[in-house]
Amino acid sequence: MVTLLGLLFTFLWSTSAIAIKFGLASTTPLFLAAVRVVLAGALLFVYMYMIRKKSPWPKGKEWRSLLILGFLNTTIYLGSIFWALNDVSAGLFNLFVTVNPFLVAALSFVFLNRKVSRKEWAGMIVAAIGLAIAAGPELVQAEAEISGIIVIGIGMASMAIGSIYFKKTDIRLPSSVINTWQLCIGGTLLMPFAFGLEREQFFLTTDAHFFGALSWLVFVTSIGTMVLWFYLLKKDAVRANNWLFLTPVFGYSLAALLLNETVSIYDMMATIFVVSGLLLSGNIPMPRKKTRRMNS
């Protein structure tokens, strides 16, 4: 069950960069990010507290934890990736996502005293080799700005820190409630950045690209994917982030279908290495043979 949810999460997560690319043809990045997050948070709030009416409200120190999570996982992370995708390709972004397992593993070792097994490290190394095979040609051919790469790095680091903070604080609230407040708080904090940084270059075209991208980003990646994300994090923060290794695999496939990008031999080789790494680390468990009981 966890494996299927992990695969679904990775597939949906990989669609985010492509949807953002479509949306950026119609408006500026931080405005698109702010509208996406605020709308998703508002819809979740209405459902959780006005329709469902049984959702618990945060109390005491939980507000502080939700404020920090919203700032790390929504304001900084989402703001960074939307901003960076103005300067880098969707494929290159999906490659950068794979930095998170290394960051989370290191932070888990330091702050959570979690022992990372040799199999997990070996699996991540094998997967990283595959990513390097795909990254080489992409870095040579892609027209990417250094500033965009730096901003992606900031976003990835913020997400890793948020993952560790979430695990360490152990908030006693349902995942849906945490996601609701994370989006509401993070979106509110993101709005001043959008207004201040994009005041001069702001533009908006209310076309199919804008509404299509916004709908997908709100209902699929902001609501559905984040619910899956928190569920996987509660199971194991390191293994949850290891699923991000498959993001380039799905990302390349979707880019070929939707953006007419070519999938090279390097991309196929990378896929083999990434899946092998996941198998080695135990993120894709091998099916066990059933043993028959002998009747005595």
Image (spheres, rainbow, N blue to C red):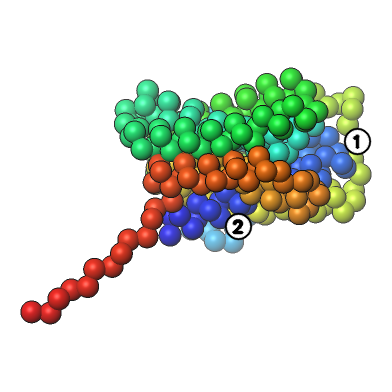
Is the residue 94 above or below the residue 255 in the image?
Answer: above
Is the residue 206 above or below the residue 153 in the image?
Answer: below
Q: Amino acid at mark 1?
A: Phe
Q: Which mark is residue 203?
A: 1
Which SS class for mark 1? loop
207 left or right, relative to 273? right
Q: Which residue is mark 2?
A: 47
Q: Which residue is rendered at x = 55% and y = 46% of the image?
A: 272
The total number of labels drawn is 2
Q: Which mark is residue 97?
A: none
**Residue furthest left in the image:** 296
Q: Position of residue 288 (x, y in %)?
A: 32, 61
* Quarter holding residue 108: top left
* Quarter holding residue 195: top right
**Residue furthest front in the image:** 265
Classed neighbour count for the residue bearing mark 2: other residues with Cα under 10 Å, few (<14), some (14–19), many (≥20): some
Specify the quadrant that holds the C terminus: bottom left
Q: Position of residue 19 (x, y in %)?
A: 75, 47
Q: Amino acid at mark 2?
A: Tyr
Query: Label 2 to label 1, Cα distance in Å?
Result: 31 Å
